[in-house]
Amino acid sequence: MTLWLERHVPKLVLAPSFAAILLFVYGFIAWTGWISLTKSRLMPKYDIEGVQQYTRLFDAPRWDVAMNNLYIFGALFIVIAMVLGLLLAILLDQKIRTEGVLRTIYLYPMALSMIVTGTAWKWILNPGLGLEKVVQGWGFENFKFDWLVNPDYAIYTIVIAAVWQSSGFVMALFLAGLRSVDSEIIKAAQVDGIPTTRIYTAIIIPSMAPIFLSAFIVLSHLAIKSFDLVIAMTNGGPGYATDLPATYMYAMAFSRGDLGQAASSAMIMMLVVFTIVVPYLYSELRTRND
Amino acid sequence: MTDLSATQGAARPWGKIALRWGLYVLLGLFALYYLVPLFVMVTTSLKSLDEIRSGSLIALPRDVTFDAWAKAWSGACTGIQCEGLRPYFFNSIAMAIPAVMISTVIGAMNGYVVAQWKFRGANIIFSLLLFGCFIPFQVVLLPMAKMLGVLGMAGTIPGLIMVHVIYGIGFTTLFFRNYYVTIPVELVKAAKIDGAGFFRIFWSIFLPLSLPIIVVSVIWQFTQIWNDFLFGVSFSQAGTQPVTVALNNIVNSTTGVKEYNVDMAAAIIAALPTLLVYVVAGKYFIRGLTAGSVKG
Protein backbone atom coordinates (compact mmCIF):
# COMPACT_ATOMS: atom_id res chain seq x y z
CA MET A 1 0.00 0.00 0.00
CA THR A 2 2.68 2.48 1.00
CA LEU A 3 4.73 1.32 -1.97
CA TRP A 4 1.81 1.95 -4.29
CA LEU A 5 1.36 5.36 -2.72
CA GLU A 6 5.04 6.12 -3.06
CA ARG A 7 4.97 5.18 -6.73
CA HIS A 8 1.87 7.18 -7.55
CA VAL A 9 2.48 10.24 -5.44
CA PRO A 10 3.48 12.46 -8.40
CA LYS A 11 0.22 11.62 -10.16
CA LEU A 12 -1.77 12.24 -7.01
CA VAL A 13 -0.13 15.63 -6.58
CA LEU A 14 -0.98 16.66 -10.11
CA ALA A 15 -4.47 15.15 -10.07
CA PRO A 16 -6.40 17.94 -8.32
CA SER A 17 -5.03 20.60 -10.68
CA PHE A 18 -5.75 18.37 -13.64
CA ALA A 19 -9.31 17.82 -12.49
CA ALA A 20 -9.79 21.52 -11.79
CA ILE A 21 -8.49 22.52 -15.21
CA LEU A 22 -10.59 19.88 -16.94
CA LEU A 23 -13.71 21.20 -15.26
CA PHE A 24 -13.07 24.93 -14.97
CA VAL A 25 -11.34 25.47 -18.28
CA TYR A 26 -12.35 22.76 -20.72
CA GLY A 27 -15.69 21.87 -19.15
CA PHE A 28 -16.64 25.52 -18.92
CA ILE A 29 -15.65 26.17 -22.52
CA ALA A 30 -17.87 23.27 -23.52
CA TRP A 31 -20.72 24.69 -21.41
CA THR A 32 -20.37 28.12 -23.03
CA GLY A 33 -20.23 26.46 -26.43
CA TRP A 34 -23.39 24.54 -25.64
CA ILE A 35 -25.25 27.66 -24.46
CA SER A 36 -24.17 29.46 -27.63
CA LEU A 37 -26.22 26.91 -29.59
CA THR A 38 -29.41 27.44 -27.59
CA LYS A 39 -32.07 30.11 -27.30
CA SER A 40 -30.93 31.16 -23.81
CA ARG A 41 -31.87 34.67 -22.78
CA LEU A 42 -32.04 35.66 -19.14
CA MET A 43 -31.79 32.04 -17.98
CA PRO A 44 -29.78 29.25 -19.57
CA LYS A 45 -31.79 26.81 -21.67
CA TYR A 46 -30.28 23.53 -22.75
CA ASP A 47 -32.16 22.58 -25.92
CA ILE A 48 -29.83 22.87 -28.88
CA GLU A 49 -31.36 25.03 -31.56
CA GLY A 50 -28.49 25.45 -34.00
CA VAL A 51 -26.31 28.35 -34.93
CA GLN A 52 -28.92 31.09 -34.79
CA GLN A 53 -27.09 32.91 -31.97
CA TYR A 54 -24.13 33.27 -34.30
CA THR A 55 -26.24 34.58 -37.19
CA ARG A 56 -27.84 37.03 -34.75
CA LEU A 57 -24.36 38.03 -33.59
CA PHE A 58 -23.04 38.62 -37.08
CA ASP A 59 -26.15 40.62 -37.96
CA ALA A 60 -25.85 42.85 -34.90
CA PRO A 61 -24.46 46.31 -35.77
CA ARG A 62 -22.98 46.60 -32.30
CA TRP A 63 -20.94 43.40 -32.76
CA ASP A 64 -19.78 44.73 -36.10
CA VAL A 65 -18.50 47.87 -34.40
CA ALA A 66 -16.83 45.76 -31.71
CA MET A 67 -14.99 43.57 -34.23
CA ASN A 68 -13.96 46.57 -36.31
CA ASN A 69 -12.65 48.24 -33.21
CA LEU A 70 -10.71 45.11 -32.37
CA TYR A 71 -8.99 45.21 -35.77
CA ILE A 72 -8.17 48.91 -35.51
CA PHE A 73 -7.16 48.75 -31.88
CA GLY A 74 -5.32 45.46 -32.21
CA ALA A 75 -3.34 46.44 -35.31
CA LEU A 76 -2.33 49.88 -34.07
CA PHE A 77 -1.61 48.71 -30.56
CA ILE A 78 0.55 45.78 -31.65
CA VAL A 79 2.48 47.68 -34.34
CA ILE A 80 3.11 50.83 -32.29
CA ALA A 81 4.01 48.94 -29.11
CA MET A 82 6.43 46.73 -31.04
CA VAL A 83 8.10 49.57 -32.92
CA LEU A 84 8.38 51.69 -29.79
CA GLY A 85 9.56 48.75 -27.73
CA LEU A 86 12.23 47.81 -30.24
CA LEU A 87 13.39 51.39 -30.58
CA LEU A 88 13.68 51.81 -26.83
CA ALA A 89 15.51 48.52 -26.50
CA ILE A 90 18.05 49.46 -29.16
CA LEU A 91 18.56 52.91 -27.67
CA LEU A 92 19.04 51.41 -24.23
CA ASP A 93 21.48 48.87 -25.59
CA GLN A 94 24.10 51.55 -26.37
CA LYS A 95 25.91 51.19 -23.06
CA ILE A 96 23.79 53.83 -21.38
CA ARG A 97 25.04 54.71 -17.94
CA THR A 98 21.58 55.29 -16.46
CA GLU A 99 20.08 52.20 -18.04
CA GLY A 100 18.73 50.74 -14.80
CA VAL A 101 16.81 53.88 -13.90
CA LEU A 102 15.47 54.38 -17.41
CA ARG A 103 14.37 50.78 -17.66
CA THR A 104 12.50 51.12 -14.39
CA ILE A 105 10.76 54.24 -15.67
CA TYR A 106 9.80 52.70 -19.02
CA LEU A 107 8.37 49.60 -17.46
CA TYR A 108 6.49 50.81 -14.40
CA PRO A 109 3.12 51.26 -16.18
CA MET A 110 3.03 47.50 -16.58
CA ALA A 111 2.65 47.21 -12.81
CA LEU A 112 -0.49 49.34 -12.83
CA SER A 113 -4.03 48.12 -13.15
CA MET A 114 -5.64 49.03 -16.46
CA ILE A 115 -8.35 50.74 -14.44
CA VAL A 116 -5.68 53.05 -12.98
CA THR A 117 -4.16 53.64 -16.42
CA GLY A 118 -7.58 54.32 -17.88
CA THR A 119 -8.48 56.73 -15.08
CA ALA A 120 -5.25 58.69 -15.59
CA TRP A 121 -5.59 58.94 -19.37
CA LYS A 122 -9.26 59.75 -19.17
CA TRP A 123 -8.34 62.75 -17.08
CA ILE A 124 -5.39 63.78 -19.26
CA LEU A 125 -7.36 63.52 -22.49
CA ASN A 126 -10.60 65.03 -21.26
CA PRO A 127 -11.47 67.91 -23.58
CA GLY A 128 -12.38 70.60 -21.04
CA LEU A 129 -9.50 70.64 -18.56
CA GLY A 130 -6.93 68.23 -19.95
CA LEU A 131 -4.34 68.28 -22.70
CA GLU A 132 -6.54 70.50 -24.89
CA LYS A 133 -6.47 73.25 -22.30
CA VAL A 134 -2.71 72.89 -21.80
CA VAL A 135 -1.97 73.36 -25.50
CA GLN A 136 -4.46 76.23 -25.71
CA GLY A 137 -2.64 77.80 -22.79
CA TRP A 138 0.58 77.70 -24.83
CA GLY A 139 -1.05 80.09 -27.29
CA PHE A 140 -2.67 77.69 -29.75
CA GLU A 141 -6.16 78.89 -28.92
CA ASN A 142 -7.89 76.97 -31.68
CA PHE A 143 -6.34 73.68 -30.68
CA LYS A 144 -8.97 71.01 -30.30
CA PHE A 145 -8.48 67.53 -28.94
CA ASP A 146 -11.79 65.88 -28.25
CA TRP A 147 -11.00 62.33 -29.37
CA LEU A 148 -12.14 60.88 -26.06
CA VAL A 149 -15.74 61.99 -26.64
CA ASN A 150 -15.72 61.80 -30.43
CA PRO A 151 -17.30 58.53 -31.61
CA ASP A 152 -15.03 58.40 -34.68
CA TYR A 153 -11.78 58.83 -32.77
CA ALA A 154 -12.42 57.55 -29.24
CA ILE A 155 -10.94 54.14 -30.05
CA TYR A 156 -7.58 55.81 -30.75
CA THR A 157 -7.44 57.18 -27.22
CA ILE A 158 -7.64 53.57 -26.02
CA VAL A 159 -4.65 52.82 -28.26
CA ILE A 160 -2.70 55.71 -26.72
CA ALA A 161 -3.28 54.46 -23.19
CA ALA A 162 -2.67 50.81 -24.07
CA VAL A 163 0.63 51.60 -25.81
CA TRP A 164 1.71 53.68 -22.84
CA GLN A 165 1.04 50.77 -20.54
CA SER A 166 2.57 47.93 -22.55
CA SER A 167 5.40 49.30 -24.66
CA GLY A 168 7.85 49.13 -21.76
CA PHE A 169 7.17 45.45 -21.48
CA VAL A 170 7.93 44.95 -25.17
CA MET A 171 11.13 46.89 -24.58
CA ALA A 172 12.09 44.48 -21.79
CA LEU A 173 11.45 41.52 -24.07
CA PHE A 174 13.54 42.95 -26.88
CA LEU A 175 16.31 44.09 -24.57
CA ALA A 176 16.60 40.56 -23.21
CA GLY A 177 16.72 39.39 -26.81
CA LEU A 178 19.41 41.87 -27.82
CA ARG A 179 21.53 40.80 -24.87
CA SER A 180 21.21 37.13 -25.76
CA VAL A 181 22.68 37.58 -29.25
CA ASP A 182 26.10 35.96 -29.40
CA SER A 183 28.53 38.75 -28.58
CA GLU A 184 31.37 37.02 -30.47
CA ILE A 185 29.52 37.48 -33.77
CA ILE A 186 28.93 41.15 -33.03
CA LYS A 187 32.56 41.67 -32.07
CA ALA A 188 33.68 39.98 -35.26
CA ALA A 189 31.40 42.23 -37.30
CA GLN A 190 32.74 45.31 -35.50
CA VAL A 191 36.31 44.22 -36.20
CA ASP A 192 35.38 43.88 -39.87
CA GLY A 193 34.26 47.53 -39.77
CA ILE A 194 30.59 46.88 -40.40
CA PRO A 195 28.57 49.96 -39.32
CA THR A 196 26.38 49.66 -36.24
CA THR A 197 23.11 50.18 -38.08
CA ARG A 198 23.99 47.35 -40.40
CA ILE A 199 24.95 45.08 -37.53
CA TYR A 200 21.45 45.66 -36.16
CA THR A 201 19.52 45.21 -39.39
CA ALA A 202 21.54 42.31 -40.75
CA ILE A 203 22.63 40.36 -37.70
CA ILE A 204 20.89 41.21 -34.46
CA ILE A 205 17.28 41.84 -35.46
CA PRO A 206 16.97 38.77 -37.74
CA SER A 207 18.29 36.57 -34.97
CA MET A 208 15.53 37.83 -32.69
CA ALA A 209 12.70 36.41 -34.81
CA PRO A 210 11.41 34.20 -31.97
CA ILE A 211 11.16 37.26 -29.73
CA PHE A 212 9.16 39.15 -32.31
CA LEU A 213 6.83 36.19 -32.39
CA SER A 214 6.57 36.09 -28.59
CA ALA A 215 5.91 39.82 -28.39
CA PHE A 216 3.27 39.51 -31.08
CA ILE A 217 1.54 36.66 -29.27
CA VAL A 218 1.53 38.45 -25.94
CA LEU A 219 0.34 41.74 -27.41
CA SER A 220 -2.40 40.23 -29.54
CA HIS A 221 -3.51 38.28 -26.51
CA LEU A 222 -3.63 41.50 -24.49
CA ALA A 223 -5.57 43.22 -27.29
CA ILE A 224 -8.24 40.55 -27.49
CA LYS A 225 -8.67 40.47 -23.74
CA SER A 226 -8.77 44.28 -23.43
CA PHE A 227 -11.70 45.11 -21.28
CA ASP A 228 -10.74 47.10 -18.22
CA LEU A 229 -9.15 49.91 -20.17
CA VAL A 230 -12.25 50.52 -22.26
CA ILE A 231 -14.51 50.33 -19.22
CA ALA A 232 -12.38 52.87 -17.34
CA MET A 233 -11.84 55.31 -20.22
CA THR A 234 -15.04 55.36 -22.23
CA ASN A 235 -17.25 52.59 -20.83
CA GLY A 236 -17.68 51.53 -24.44
CA GLY A 237 -19.03 54.94 -25.41
CA PRO A 238 -19.88 57.38 -26.81
CA GLY A 239 -22.87 55.15 -27.53
CA TYR A 240 -21.10 51.90 -28.26
CA ALA A 241 -18.38 53.47 -30.42
CA THR A 242 -15.52 51.93 -28.43
CA ASP A 243 -17.02 48.54 -27.76
CA LEU A 244 -14.62 45.63 -28.09
CA PRO A 245 -15.68 41.98 -28.17
CA ALA A 246 -14.82 41.73 -24.46
CA THR A 247 -17.11 44.63 -23.49
CA TYR A 248 -19.83 43.38 -25.83
CA MET A 249 -19.74 40.00 -24.16
CA TYR A 250 -19.87 41.56 -20.73
CA ALA A 251 -22.79 43.82 -21.62
CA MET A 252 -24.76 40.90 -23.01
CA ALA A 253 -24.01 38.70 -20.02
CA PHE A 254 -24.51 41.09 -17.14
CA SER A 255 -26.60 44.05 -18.23
CA ARG A 256 -28.65 42.94 -21.22
CA GLY A 257 -29.48 39.50 -19.88
CA ASP A 258 -28.83 37.84 -23.22
CA LEU A 259 -26.87 34.73 -22.34
CA GLY A 260 -27.03 33.32 -25.86
CA GLN A 261 -25.32 36.37 -27.32
CA ALA A 262 -22.83 36.49 -24.47
CA ALA A 263 -21.91 32.86 -25.01
CA SER A 264 -21.61 33.08 -28.79
CA SER A 265 -19.48 36.25 -28.63
CA ALA A 266 -17.24 34.59 -26.02
CA MET A 267 -16.82 31.59 -28.32
CA ILE A 268 -15.77 33.86 -31.18
CA MET A 269 -13.19 35.49 -28.92
CA MET A 270 -11.98 32.04 -28.00
CA LEU A 271 -11.70 31.15 -31.67
CA VAL A 272 -9.59 34.24 -32.40
CA VAL A 273 -7.24 33.39 -29.54
CA PHE A 274 -7.09 29.77 -30.68
CA THR A 275 -6.00 30.62 -34.18
CA ILE A 276 -3.17 32.79 -32.86
CA VAL A 277 -2.00 30.89 -29.81
CA VAL A 278 -2.40 27.22 -30.68
CA PRO A 279 0.18 27.08 -33.48
CA TYR A 280 2.58 29.01 -31.25
CA LEU A 281 2.12 26.82 -28.19
CA TYR A 282 2.30 23.72 -30.34
CA SER A 283 5.64 24.68 -31.84
CA GLU A 284 6.95 25.82 -28.44
CA LEU A 285 6.09 22.56 -26.75
CA ARG A 286 7.37 20.48 -29.63
CA THR A 287 10.77 22.14 -29.77
CA ARG A 288 11.03 21.84 -26.00
CA ASN A 289 10.42 18.13 -26.07
CA ASP A 290 12.96 17.48 -28.79
CA MET B 1 31.07 53.94 -49.38
CA THR B 2 34.82 54.20 -48.77
CA ASP B 3 34.68 57.98 -49.34
CA LEU B 4 31.96 58.28 -46.76
CA SER B 5 33.86 56.37 -44.12
CA ALA B 6 36.93 58.54 -44.78
CA THR B 7 35.04 61.76 -44.01
CA GLN B 8 33.31 60.02 -41.14
CA GLY B 9 36.70 59.18 -39.69
CA ALA B 10 37.75 62.83 -39.70
CA ALA B 11 34.54 64.04 -38.05
CA ARG B 12 34.30 61.17 -35.64
CA PRO B 13 34.91 62.83 -32.25
CA TRP B 14 32.36 65.60 -32.78
CA GLY B 15 29.87 63.39 -34.56
CA LYS B 16 30.16 60.82 -31.84
CA ILE B 17 29.63 63.32 -29.06
CA ALA B 18 26.60 64.82 -30.80
CA LEU B 19 25.16 61.35 -31.35
CA ARG B 20 25.70 60.50 -27.72
CA TRP B 21 23.94 63.65 -26.60
CA GLY B 22 21.09 63.06 -29.02
CA LEU B 23 20.73 59.58 -27.62
CA TYR B 24 20.45 60.81 -24.06
CA VAL B 25 17.97 63.54 -25.03
CA LEU B 26 15.82 61.01 -26.84
CA LEU B 27 15.92 58.60 -23.91
CA GLY B 28 15.06 61.47 -21.58
CA LEU B 29 12.07 62.46 -23.72
CA PHE B 30 10.77 58.91 -23.61
CA ALA B 31 11.22 58.87 -19.85
CA LEU B 32 9.09 62.04 -19.71
CA TYR B 33 6.40 60.37 -21.81
CA TYR B 34 6.15 57.55 -19.30
CA LEU B 35 6.39 59.80 -16.26
CA VAL B 36 4.02 62.63 -17.20
CA PRO B 37 0.80 60.68 -16.49
CA LEU B 38 2.07 59.76 -13.03
CA PHE B 39 3.15 63.35 -12.44
CA VAL B 40 -0.26 64.62 -13.52
CA MET B 41 -2.01 62.14 -11.25
CA VAL B 42 0.04 63.15 -8.22
CA THR B 43 -0.22 66.91 -8.77
CA THR B 44 -3.95 66.75 -9.56
CA SER B 45 -4.58 64.78 -6.38
CA LEU B 46 -2.89 67.54 -4.36
CA LYS B 47 -4.90 70.42 -5.83
CA SER B 48 -8.26 71.83 -4.82
CA LEU B 49 -11.09 71.60 -7.34
CA ASP B 50 -10.99 75.38 -7.87
CA GLU B 51 -7.33 75.23 -8.73
CA ILE B 52 -7.93 72.33 -11.11
CA ARG B 53 -10.62 74.29 -12.95
CA SER B 54 -8.65 77.51 -13.17
CA GLY B 55 -5.11 76.19 -13.57
CA SER B 56 -3.23 74.03 -16.00
CA LEU B 57 -3.09 70.24 -16.05
CA ILE B 58 0.68 70.18 -15.85
CA ALA B 59 1.17 73.00 -13.34
CA LEU B 60 2.45 72.24 -9.86
CA PRO B 61 -0.14 72.73 -7.11
CA ARG B 62 -0.07 76.24 -5.58
CA ASP B 63 -1.66 75.17 -2.31
CA VAL B 64 -0.95 71.57 -1.52
CA THR B 65 -3.95 69.94 0.10
CA PHE B 66 -4.47 66.33 1.15
CA ASP B 67 -8.26 66.67 1.33
CA ALA B 68 -8.72 64.67 -1.84
CA TRP B 69 -6.62 61.86 -0.42
CA ALA B 70 -8.64 61.78 2.79
CA LYS B 71 -11.86 61.73 0.82
CA ALA B 72 -10.63 59.05 -1.60
CA TRP B 73 -9.61 56.86 1.32
CA SER B 74 -12.67 57.18 3.51
CA GLY B 75 -15.37 59.38 2.03
CA ALA B 76 -15.74 59.04 -1.72
CA CYS B 77 -18.94 57.49 -3.05
CA THR B 78 -18.87 54.23 -4.98
CA GLY B 79 -22.55 54.43 -5.80
CA ILE B 80 -24.90 54.80 -2.84
CA GLN B 81 -22.21 54.00 -0.29
CA CYS B 82 -19.75 56.74 0.61
CA GLU B 83 -17.00 55.05 2.59
CA GLY B 84 -14.14 55.71 0.22
CA LEU B 85 -11.72 53.06 -1.00
CA ARG B 86 -10.73 51.79 2.43
CA PRO B 87 -13.10 48.80 2.78
CA TYR B 88 -12.40 47.71 -0.79
CA PHE B 89 -8.66 48.05 -0.34
CA PHE B 90 -8.92 45.57 2.53
CA ASN B 91 -11.15 43.34 0.40
CA SER B 92 -8.37 43.22 -2.16
CA ILE B 93 -5.83 42.33 0.52
CA ALA B 94 -8.11 39.63 1.93
CA MET B 95 -8.53 38.25 -1.58
CA ALA B 96 -4.99 38.57 -2.90
CA ILE B 97 -2.93 37.15 -0.03
CA PRO B 98 -4.60 33.72 0.25
CA ALA B 99 -5.00 33.43 -3.53
CA VAL B 100 -1.30 34.21 -4.11
CA MET B 101 -0.15 31.79 -1.43
CA ILE B 102 -2.37 28.90 -2.50
CA SER B 103 -1.66 29.25 -6.22
CA THR B 104 2.09 29.49 -5.60
CA VAL B 105 2.17 26.34 -3.43
CA ILE B 106 0.13 24.41 -5.99
CA GLY B 107 2.30 25.72 -8.81
CA ALA B 108 5.47 24.66 -7.01
CA MET B 109 4.24 21.10 -6.49
CA ASN B 110 2.91 20.84 -10.04
CA GLY B 111 6.09 22.26 -11.54
CA TYR B 112 8.16 19.83 -9.46
CA VAL B 113 6.19 16.88 -10.80
CA VAL B 114 6.18 18.01 -14.41
CA ALA B 115 9.90 18.82 -14.41
CA GLN B 116 11.34 15.98 -12.33
CA TRP B 117 8.80 13.20 -11.86
CA LYS B 118 7.57 12.75 -15.39
CA PHE B 119 5.05 10.00 -15.90
CA ARG B 120 3.17 8.99 -19.01
CA GLY B 121 0.77 11.79 -19.84
CA ALA B 122 2.48 14.38 -17.63
CA ASN B 123 3.42 16.42 -20.67
CA ILE B 124 -0.13 16.39 -21.96
CA ILE B 125 -1.42 17.55 -18.59
CA PHE B 126 1.17 20.33 -18.59
CA SER B 127 0.12 21.41 -22.08
CA LEU B 128 -3.52 21.46 -21.02
CA LEU B 129 -2.61 23.54 -17.96
CA LEU B 130 -0.54 25.91 -20.04
CA PHE B 131 -3.26 26.39 -22.56
CA GLY B 132 -5.55 27.42 -19.73
CA CYS B 133 -3.35 30.52 -19.31
CA PHE B 134 -4.29 31.73 -22.74
CA ILE B 135 -8.05 31.43 -22.86
CA PRO B 136 -9.99 34.67 -22.90
CA PHE B 137 -11.71 34.56 -19.53
CA GLN B 138 -14.98 35.70 -21.09
CA VAL B 139 -15.45 32.11 -22.15
CA VAL B 140 -15.66 30.92 -18.54
CA LEU B 141 -17.55 33.86 -17.01
CA LEU B 142 -21.08 32.52 -17.40
CA PRO B 143 -20.52 28.96 -16.15
CA MET B 144 -18.32 30.26 -13.32
CA ALA B 145 -21.04 32.63 -12.18
CA LYS B 146 -23.43 29.69 -12.12
CA MET B 147 -20.94 27.42 -10.38
CA LEU B 148 -20.24 29.98 -7.66
CA GLY B 149 -23.99 30.24 -7.13
CA VAL B 150 -24.30 26.46 -6.80
CA LEU B 151 -21.44 26.39 -4.30
CA GLY B 152 -23.01 29.23 -2.32
CA MET B 153 -19.94 31.39 -2.99
CA ALA B 154 -21.50 33.94 -5.32
CA GLY B 155 -20.44 37.46 -4.43
CA THR B 156 -18.06 36.35 -1.68
CA ILE B 157 -14.34 36.88 -1.24
CA PRO B 158 -13.65 33.12 -0.87
CA GLY B 159 -15.36 32.73 -4.24
CA LEU B 160 -13.00 35.24 -5.80
CA ILE B 161 -10.03 33.53 -4.14
CA MET B 162 -11.08 30.24 -5.69
CA VAL B 163 -11.43 31.80 -9.14
CA HIS B 164 -8.00 33.44 -8.95
CA VAL B 165 -6.36 30.24 -7.74
CA ILE B 166 -7.88 28.13 -10.51
CA TYR B 167 -6.92 30.46 -13.33
CA GLY B 168 -3.53 31.24 -11.78
CA ILE B 169 -2.10 27.73 -11.46
CA GLY B 170 -1.33 27.52 -15.18
CA PHE B 171 1.15 30.36 -14.83
CA THR B 172 2.60 29.34 -11.48
CA THR B 173 3.11 25.78 -12.75
CA LEU B 174 4.90 27.17 -15.78
CA PHE B 175 7.23 29.29 -13.63
CA PHE B 176 8.24 26.42 -11.35
CA ARG B 177 8.42 23.88 -14.14
CA ASN B 178 10.81 26.03 -16.17
CA TYR B 179 12.92 26.62 -13.08
CA TYR B 180 13.07 23.03 -11.85
CA VAL B 181 13.76 21.63 -15.30
CA THR B 182 17.25 23.14 -15.09
CA ILE B 183 18.08 21.13 -11.96
CA PRO B 184 19.96 17.97 -13.02
CA VAL B 185 17.92 14.76 -12.81
CA GLU B 186 20.99 13.01 -11.40
CA LEU B 187 20.39 14.88 -8.18
CA VAL B 188 16.97 13.35 -7.80
CA LYS B 189 18.27 9.93 -8.82
CA ALA B 190 21.02 10.07 -6.21
CA ALA B 191 18.57 11.16 -3.55
CA LYS B 192 16.25 8.31 -4.48
CA ILE B 193 19.06 5.81 -4.13
CA ASP B 194 19.68 7.23 -0.71
CA GLY B 195 16.10 6.36 0.08
CA ALA B 196 14.55 9.84 -0.01
CA GLY B 197 10.96 10.05 -1.17
CA PHE B 198 8.99 12.53 -3.24
CA PHE B 199 8.29 15.07 -0.53
CA ARG B 200 11.60 14.61 1.24
CA ILE B 201 13.50 15.44 -1.99
CA PHE B 202 11.30 18.45 -2.58
CA TRP B 203 11.70 19.68 0.97
CA SER B 204 15.45 19.29 1.31
CA ILE B 205 16.74 19.76 -2.25
CA PHE B 206 14.26 21.77 -4.30
CA LEU B 207 12.69 24.10 -1.78
CA PRO B 208 16.01 25.58 -0.56
CA LEU B 209 16.87 26.43 -4.18
CA SER B 210 13.48 27.95 -4.93
CA LEU B 211 13.57 31.37 -3.32
CA PRO B 212 14.03 33.36 -6.58
CA ILE B 213 11.25 31.58 -8.40
CA ILE B 214 8.95 31.82 -5.40
CA VAL B 215 9.50 35.58 -5.45
CA VAL B 216 8.76 35.69 -9.19
CA SER B 217 5.60 33.67 -8.76
CA VAL B 218 4.36 35.64 -5.76
CA ILE B 219 4.96 38.97 -7.48
CA TRP B 220 3.34 37.85 -10.71
CA GLN B 221 0.28 36.45 -8.98
CA PHE B 222 -0.03 39.42 -6.64
CA THR B 223 0.11 41.89 -9.53
CA GLN B 224 -2.37 39.90 -11.58
CA ILE B 225 -4.85 39.42 -8.77
CA TRP B 226 -4.57 42.91 -7.32
CA ASN B 227 -5.03 44.49 -10.73
CA ASP B 228 -7.78 42.17 -11.88
CA PHE B 229 -11.02 43.83 -12.84
CA LEU B 230 -12.98 41.33 -14.92
CA PHE B 231 -13.40 38.66 -12.24
CA GLY B 232 -13.86 41.31 -9.58
CA VAL B 233 -16.68 43.06 -11.38
CA SER B 234 -18.33 39.82 -12.47
CA PHE B 235 -18.25 37.84 -9.25
CA SER B 236 -18.53 40.37 -6.43
CA GLN B 237 -21.44 42.26 -4.97
CA ALA B 238 -21.88 45.47 -2.98
CA GLY B 239 -19.47 45.20 -0.06
CA THR B 240 -17.16 42.50 -1.42
CA GLN B 241 -15.77 44.35 -4.41
CA PRO B 242 -12.00 44.55 -4.86
CA VAL B 243 -10.30 47.92 -5.04
CA THR B 244 -10.16 48.12 -8.84
CA VAL B 245 -13.93 47.80 -9.08
CA ALA B 246 -14.46 50.39 -6.35
CA LEU B 247 -12.05 52.77 -8.08
CA ASN B 248 -13.95 52.44 -11.33
CA ASN B 249 -17.22 53.08 -9.48
CA ILE B 250 -15.81 56.21 -7.85
CA VAL B 251 -14.45 57.58 -11.11
CA ASN B 252 -17.48 56.75 -13.20
CA SER B 253 -20.22 57.51 -10.71
CA THR B 254 -22.46 60.05 -12.36
CA THR B 255 -23.90 61.65 -9.24
CA GLY B 256 -22.67 65.02 -8.00
CA VAL B 257 -19.74 67.15 -9.08
CA LYS B 258 -16.83 65.45 -10.79
CA GLU B 259 -13.98 65.56 -8.34
CA TYR B 260 -10.89 64.93 -10.41
CA ASN B 261 -8.55 65.32 -7.46
CA VAL B 262 -10.40 62.59 -5.55
CA ASP B 263 -10.37 60.35 -8.63
CA MET B 264 -6.62 60.74 -8.99
CA ALA B 265 -5.93 60.17 -5.30
CA ALA B 266 -8.09 57.05 -5.44
CA ALA B 267 -6.24 55.81 -8.52
CA ILE B 268 -2.88 56.25 -6.82
CA ILE B 269 -4.08 54.49 -3.68
CA ALA B 270 -5.30 51.57 -5.78
CA ALA B 271 -1.97 51.46 -7.63
CA LEU B 272 0.32 51.83 -4.60
CA PRO B 273 0.69 48.18 -3.57
CA THR B 274 1.72 46.93 -7.01
CA LEU B 275 3.89 50.00 -7.63
CA LEU B 276 5.62 49.37 -4.33
CA VAL B 277 6.24 45.74 -5.25
CA TYR B 278 7.62 46.87 -8.60
CA VAL B 279 9.99 49.39 -7.06
CA VAL B 280 11.23 46.98 -4.40
CA ALA B 281 11.49 43.87 -6.56
CA GLY B 282 11.43 45.08 -10.15
CA LYS B 283 13.99 42.51 -11.26
CA TYR B 284 11.70 39.65 -10.28
CA PHE B 285 8.69 41.39 -11.78
CA ILE B 286 10.41 41.54 -15.15
CA ARG B 287 11.49 37.92 -14.87
CA GLY B 288 7.89 36.94 -14.33
CA LEU B 289 6.74 38.99 -17.30
CA THR B 290 9.29 37.50 -19.62
CA ALA B 291 9.27 33.97 -18.21
CA GLY B 292 6.32 32.79 -20.21
CA SER B 293 7.18 34.57 -23.41
CA VAL B 294 10.89 34.09 -24.05
CA LYS B 295 11.99 30.76 -25.36
CA GLY B 296 14.27 29.14 -22.88
Image (cartoon, grey):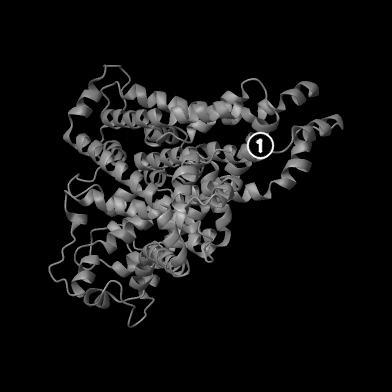
* Residue drawn at the location 37% of the way across and 46% of the way down: B233
Q: Is residue B120 above or below residue B50?
A: above
Quadrant for the N terminus of chain A in the image: top right
Quadrant for the C terminus of chain A in the image: top right
* Nearer to the camera, B181 or A130: B181
Name which quarter of the figure residue B202 lies in: top right
Q: Tell whether A104 sits left or right of B105.
A: left
User: Mark 1 falls on what kind of element?
Assistant: helix
Q: Tell whether A44 sits left or right of B130.
A: left
x and y percent of residue A115 in the render? 36, 54
Q: Tell whether A190 sits left or right of A233.
A: right
x and y percent of residue A159 in the render? 30, 50
Name which quarter of the figure residue B138 lies in: top left
Name which quarter of the figure residue A67 lies in: top left
Q: Label 1 crowding class (10 Å Cα cut-off): few <14, some 14-19, many 20+?
A: many
Q: Is residue B78 visible?
A: no
Q: Is residue A263 above or below residue A149?
A: above
x and y percent of residue B292 in the render? 53, 40
x and y percent of residue A275 in the render? 38, 28
Q: Is residue B107 above or below residue B251?
A: above
Q: Is residue B105 visible?
A: yes
Determine which residue is flagged by label 1.
B109
* Nearer to the camera, B53 or A107: A107
Q: Is residue A99 above or below residue A18?
A: below
Q: Amino acid at mark 1?
A: Met
**Residue at the extreme left of the image, as rendered:** A142
Q: Tell whether A279 sits left or right of B180.
A: left
Determine the chain carrying the residue at label 1. B
